[in-house]
Image: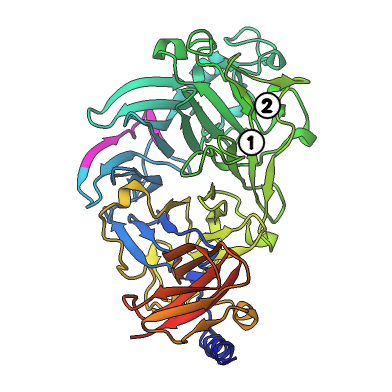
Amino acid sequence: MRNLFTILLMGVFMAGMLAQDNTVGLISLKSWLADDGYTLLYPHNQSNVYLINNCGEIVHMWEGAEETKPGNTAYLLENGNLVTTSRPSVFAGNAIWAGGGGATIEVKSWDNELLSTYTLNDETARLHHDIEVMPNGNILAISWEYRSREEAIAAGRDSMNLPDNSIWPEDVLELNPTTGEIVWEWHSWDHLIQDFDETKANFGVVGDHPELIDLNYDTHDGDADWLHANAIDYQPEFDQIMLSIPYFDEVWIIDHSTTTEQASGSTGGTWGQGGDILYRWGNPKTYRAGDSTDQKLFFQHDAHWNVDHISPGNSDFGKIMVFNNRVGADFSTANIFDPMFDDYDGNYMIMDGQYIPSDFDLTLTHPTPQRMYSTGLSSFQQLVNDNYLITVGRFGYTFEITPDNEIVWEYITPIRGGATIPQGDSLTINNNLTFRSHKFPVDFEAFEGKDLSSKGWIELEPRMDYCELLTDIDELSTTTLRMYPVPANSTLTVDLPEGTDHRVELYTLSGQRVVVKSGLQNYAMIDVSSFQEGIYIVRVNGSQTGRVIVTK
């Protein structure tokens, strides 16, 4: 009874301390349910890349040049190197510019030493949005390619859809970052079809050629930025590349096993189609195979194969994940679907004229759907513990959610227009744009031997005790775990239910597991004499939870 009374008092005390919740940075945490890992953030309108723990504390930072901004992604590699994309802060006078514009790819060491750099930003082409680091160390990059009004009309573009007097189709470039050499490339301009003008190139029946791109399908009033690719990914097993094409509301898959010459045509490569589209999904209207009722994707972001950090035994391993931005008038969804590639026959199936599947395998929304609404940016990741990490880009809001739709971690990027703000300030749409986030497990190879202790917070005037104070008061008041002594300073004893083979785990409030004991019966004795002072989470058999204070 004394133990339960102590826990209840602790809950009342902590509830009072939390009368004023954080407004930025860490908002909520259920550490016993959240994935134990570190989240990489590269917020817009500033130049630094941050790695934070579940308490919202910086554990590492890569400082960027003040005169640059994200362009738009950063990737942490297993060897500890960081690959970033950036652009000049000032883009006035640039020959090619649109939202998501980049310019430079840099490879940096863990200690922020510049190892290599590559820039493409001139009157002919510009890097933008995203890159993908391949297993061989090369980098796949998306680039706009300038084509003049004359070239567009000659290719079959309707002249009424050229208000900018140019068009920027997409290229994919494979770059050797050490030498700066382009070792492979693919150009969407080589894979066009049009039924507008039979006297021009690429004329044909659009509906008969889903492997080609309708030059006159246009959803943005003839903008030069015609396709606006915003994500790229690579699948090494099949040697395929995925592109997210939000202006077509589609994802495309192309063959990377071709030579550059084969990639410009319709034959060759492992899958025999050269550089033509192997698979496209999300909006069959683009190849005249459906209507608005068949559309599934709406200006999607972060399209990728679900393979990072999770087990191949996971039922969703290898499927495609997207953040579906504009699926609703005031909410977005996060989705998973299976393209069902037949690697034996080497094709993606079409049924009734449309690529399968007919619908998503998974649709996630926020418990309050309007909290998860972003017309652009944003990301979606499945975690080691089967939770999901979602970033709502226009609000800089990142949260972790369980498969049962329970929020277990929330973080708001504490930056307004590129400047860090103090705790207590509030933010609104587009103040703290965050293109993506990515959470790495604690045993990720890059972290071996690294100092991941707290280096402070991104926000100014942080509440340094907030993580320790965060708790679920209902959980405290209803716990049935018996633990003694409370507080504990040398040995903590946890009484266990009848039966055998019990499992007891102890976690810090930041989610780090510090003790695991299994095969127990009757009770568990845990040596806490070397622990730092603070509050710890005790979990029994993965379900019962309680909290204990450790003192010296």
For mark 2, give the secondary structure.
Answer: helix
Q: Is residue 223 magenta?
A: no
What percent of the width, then of the height, locates residue 161?
Answer: 61, 28
- Identity of the residue drawn at 22% across and 27% down: 179
Query: For mark 2, what is the residue?
Result: 286
In this rendering, does residue 465 appear at all?
Answer: no
Type of amino acid under label 2: Thr
Q: Is residue 38 left or right of residue 411?
A: left
Q: Is residue 385 left or right of residue 195?
A: left
What percent of the width, then of the height, locates residue 542?
Answer: 58, 63
What percent of the width, then of the height, locates residue 504?
Answer: 51, 67
What percent of the width, then of the height, locates residue 377?
Answer: 53, 49
Badge 1 local density, few (<14 within 10 Å), some, or many (20+)?
many
- Identity of the residue drawn at 72% across and 28% down: 285
Type of amino acid under label 1: Asp
For mark 1, give the secondary structure.
Answer: loop
Which secondary structure dominates the residues rendered in magenta? strand
Q: How many marks?
A: 2
* Mark with earlier residue (2, 1): 1
Q: How is the image coloured?
A: rainbow
| Quarter of the C terminus within the rendering | bottom left
Badge 2 local density, few (<14 within 10 Å), some, or many (20+)?
many
Asked which quadrant contains residue 142, the reply is top left
State the extent of the magenta-drawn residues as a range: 115-129
Q: Is residue 477 left or right of residue 234?
A: right
User: Do tag 2 and tag 1 residues touch (Cβ < 8 Å)?
Assistant: yes
Query: For mark 1, what is the residue?
Result: 249
For residue 446, which numbered disc appears in the image?
A: none
| Quarter of the N terminus within the rendering | bottom right
